[in-house]
Amino acid sequence: MATFFGIEERDAQDFIARHTVCLPHAADGSPELQYTVSPMHKEDIVFIKHCDSPFSLHIKAVGIVQSDYPAERMPDVCLPVDWVWQGEKVVEQFDESIPLCGEALYEEHNIVIQREIIDLLADRYRMPQAW
């Protein structure tokens, strides 16, 4: 089963154009210790998002991680991603706040938000309706 990771829009510059997702850095530019080993793996779902409040989530892009190994010729730790959807989907109807929404990278556990993201995936990545 795939894991869902949200990436803050301000930290996702050029990810779509480079077909990657890169692990966050500390303010001084060094890799953050908690991301020394990538939490993301092949076939995980990543999404670029922005929050207006703890109760309003704007999904900007959705992609699928393509490999467990970093992309070559990148100075950062960046994994290849197939960005399958871009746009703006506002999700406001969920039962709880998103306390980690402002974080550079977090694992999304809210099932309502996960379903909204799955609905944005291209047909080739969707599970059969019987699931």
Image (cartoon, helix red, strand yellow):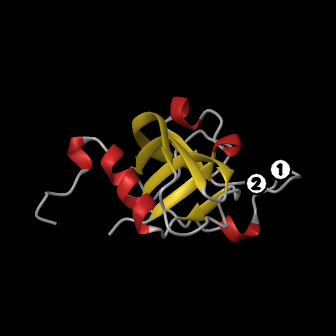
User: Could you say where residue 128 lies in the image, as x and y percent from the top left?
Assistant: 14, 57
The mark found on residue 40 in the picture is none
In the foreground, 15 or 53:
53
User: Could you say where residue 91 lies in the image, as x and y percent from the top left?
Assistant: 49, 50
Residue bearing the label numbered 1: 29
Residue 9 picture quarter = top right
Looking at the image, is 69 positioned above or below residue 50? below
Q: Identify the residue at the far top of this view.
A: 17
Q: Residue at x 61, y 32 (%)?
A: 14
Provide the secondary structure element on which disc 2 rests.
loop
Is 41 left, or right, of 17 in this rendering? left
Is 103 left, or right, of 49 in this rendering? right
Near mark 2 (Cα within 10 A), the count class, few <14, some 14-19 or many ≥20, is: some
Q: Amino acid at mark 1?
A: Gly
Q: Amino acid at mark 2?
A: His
Q: CA distance from mark 2 to mark 1?
A: 5 Å
Looking at the image, is 12 positioned above or below residue 65? above
Residues at marks 2 and 1 touching, judged by CB atoms closer than 8 Å: yes
Residue 105 seen anywhere in this rendered image of the structure = yes
Q: Residue at x 31, y 49 (%)?
A: 119
Residue bearing the label numbered 2: 25
Near mark 1 (Cα within 10 A), the count class, few <14, some 14-19 or many ≥20, is: few
User: Could you say where residue 69 lies in the image, as x and y percent from the top left?
Assistant: 48, 56
Q: Identify the residue at the far left of this view.
A: 130
User: Could you say where residue 57 lies in the image, as x and y percent from the top left?
Assistant: 57, 50
Q: How many marks?
A: 2
Residue 3 picture quarter = bottom left
